[in-house]
Amino acid sequence: MKATKQKIMKATRQNIPKMEVELLKNLPSEIVIEILSRLPIRTIGICKRVCKSWRDLLQTREFVDCHLSKSMHGLVVCHGFMTYDVLAFEEELDLENRERSYNPLTKLDCNEVLISIFDVKGSVNGLLFLHPLSSVATDYYVCNPITREYIEFPFEQRLLDAYYNDVVNYGFGVSKVTGQYKVVRIARIRKSICHVYTLGTRKWRRIVDPGPQLGKNQHSNGAFINGRLHWFVEDPALSRLISCFDLETETFSTFSYPPLSTRGRHFQVLVALGDYLCICDNGDEDEIALWLMKEYGDEKSWTKEFVIRKSPELINRYGQSCGIVYPVKVFEDGHVLMTWEDLDLNMFLKMFYYSNKTNTTRVIDAYDVFGITSSGIPMQAMTHTPSFLSLKSFPKEYVNKFFSSRSP
């Protein structure tokens, strides 16, 4: 792998005439940033090694922000709770072309840190929030697979996680105005207790108003959209409400959602799907309904955008639904990528693809399509936007690095 990178770097240098390098040197830095930010991730990684001036320029916040504004939404796939593959693809997933594959940009192996198994709780601007599943864990983690950096910060009131893990809800996002990255944890014992950790502060803060009582869902990650995190409210006195936490003002509010199937909240999932807040209703025995809030904050704008017939893999031998589908990404052609959680095992086991042309779903071999090597199940996937945002930009945090596996 190292020899291959050296060959690529050598070829890259040879293909850049000295005149063109000198031309770029004479251009204003903002124009050079604009040019380099349009290059593929791997090419940018090579450019860092071309010359010192480029390396320094590609590490500036101006370049990071410029590149992030153009970065394509990709995918992060976690398999076996240990290995993470970051993939990039265009706004179309061509599964009909058997010869086309989507090679990973980079891979992370969490065996490099002391706690080896994690659950992904959020992905924002290239950063992943990882929750350790080990009973002896004492820290949460945030990492950037592209820069291969990670930080760890301690639990707050550790016993709450040890004894009440099934009633703890998480969220990870960034505030709209100040650009602060925050982890939110809401635990429920007799009442809700909300804590916020702002990256760069090295401390948790308790929110005075913890908001309404939230749902009991092992995979209840706060849906991040429009600078806010969202969860289902679970309170007998409050029906059909979504709790919304503004990361800028750190205040809670609520709004309603449309009537769904009567099978129960356990079969309904709240996610951010592209630019929309989405409810995936798995409650019907035969169909999956995707509701989108077309105008954020407008309760009347909820629209049933997709009705997807359940494939045989989602039905057990008694004719009943045996899992929950989580929508991951809607492509420009209307196709939908989804993952499936087995209710008996509480694990994500399969990936599905809904074709808007044929109105059918089918299981896809993620390891074959995405070119990743299986290290076992379960397999979790969510959208991820690759970025060069360095965790060193957060003061007071202790930054470590992954060293093995491939990098851009």
Image (cartoon, rainbow, N blue to C red):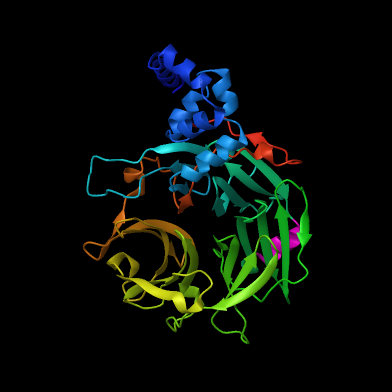
In the displayed structure image, the side of residue 221 where residue 341 appears, left or right: left
Q: Residue 301's x, y, as percent?
A: 45, 75
User: What residue sits 54% from the left and 30% below the top?
Assistant: 404
Residue 135: which quarter of the image?
bottom right
In front here: 242 or 276?
276
Tally of numbered discs: 0
In front here: 84 or 344?
84
Point out the stretch of residues depicted in magenta.
156-165
Residue 216: which quarter of the image?
bottom right
User: What residue sits 76% from the left and 56% below the top?
Assistant: 204
Q: Is residue 105 above or below residue 186?
A: above
Can the viewer see residue 153 in this picture? yes
Q: Residue 142's x, y, as percent?
A: 63, 46
Magenta-drawn stretch contains 160 = yes
In front here: 206 or 404?
206
From this viewpoint, which residue is outermost toward the bottom? 237
Q: Looking at the magenta stretch, what is its main secondary structure? A: helix
In the displayed structure image, the side of residue 367 where residue 132 appears, left or right: right
User: What residue sits 53% from the left and 40% below the top?
Assistant: 66
User: What residue sits 46% from the left and 31% below the top?
Assistant: 35
Q: Residue 266's x, y, as percent?
A: 50, 74
Residue 253: which quarter of the image?
bottom right
Q: Quadrant of the N terminus?
A: top left
Q: Residue 7's x, y, as percent?
A: 41, 17
